Amino acid sequence: MSSEGNKDEGFELWDLKVEVVAPKGAKIWCGANVGDWFELRGEMLYLPPDQGISIYSLASVLPLLAAKQRPTDGNDWMTTDAEIACPDPNCPSRLKITRTKLRKFNHSDTTAVPLGDNDANN
């Protein structure tokens, strides 16, 4: 069913900006520079031209991004906690997650599984 056929299929996700932060003058071991960043818009990850990110740093933050995209209760730690430590115990850098823009999506534009498919919930 198309998005026009069902008005109740919309949901919202936050776009996220993930930025490298560290204490001033700190030696960063993960290959990042303070101020390096990427954005997550929907399911798509965007990096600026000529900038990379360590797969280990990315792995430390990836499990949290889908939860940070969703609206959360004000008392939930996922709402208040924004910095994720570098996985290298000797590296003082952190990845700071900031919610930037609330974006609306339609169920039928994001999956082939129709709404109301009870088999999908089992």
Image (cartoon, grey):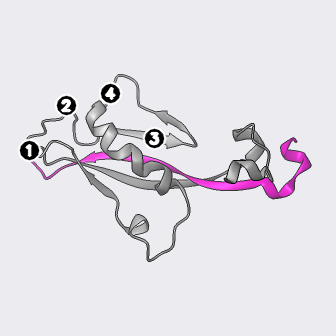
Q: Which residue is mark 2?
A: 31
Quadrant of the frame with the N terminus: top right
Element type at marker 4?
A: loop
Sequence-wise, the earlier of marks 4 and 1 is 4
Element type at marker 2?
A: loop
Distance from label 4 to label 2 (Cα)?
9 Å
Tag 4 and tag 1, C-beta contact below 8 Å: no
The quadrant holding residue 71 is: bottom right
Q: Are there few (<14), some (14-19), or many (20+) residues within 10 Å of tag 3?
A: some
Q: Which residue is mark 1?
A: 90
Residue 97 in percent (x, y) is at 38, 53
Distance from label 4 to label 3 (Cα)?
12 Å
Tag 4 and tag 2, C-beta contact below 8 Å: yes
Q: Which residue is mark 4?
A: 52
Residue extending furthest top?
50
Asked if residue 26 is among those painted magenta in the image, a careful observer would answer no
Could you say which is closer to the camera, residue 2 or residue 26? 2
Sequence-wise, the earlier of marks 1 and 3 is 3
- For badge 1, the amino acid type reads Asn
What span is in magenta? 1-25
Residue 20 in percent (x, y) is at 27, 44
Q: Which residue is mark 3?
A: 39
Sequence-wise, the earlier of marks 1 and 2 is 2
Sequence-wise, the earlier of marks 4 and 3 is 3
Q: Kindly identify the residue that appears in the image at 13 percent across and 48 percent down.
A: 92
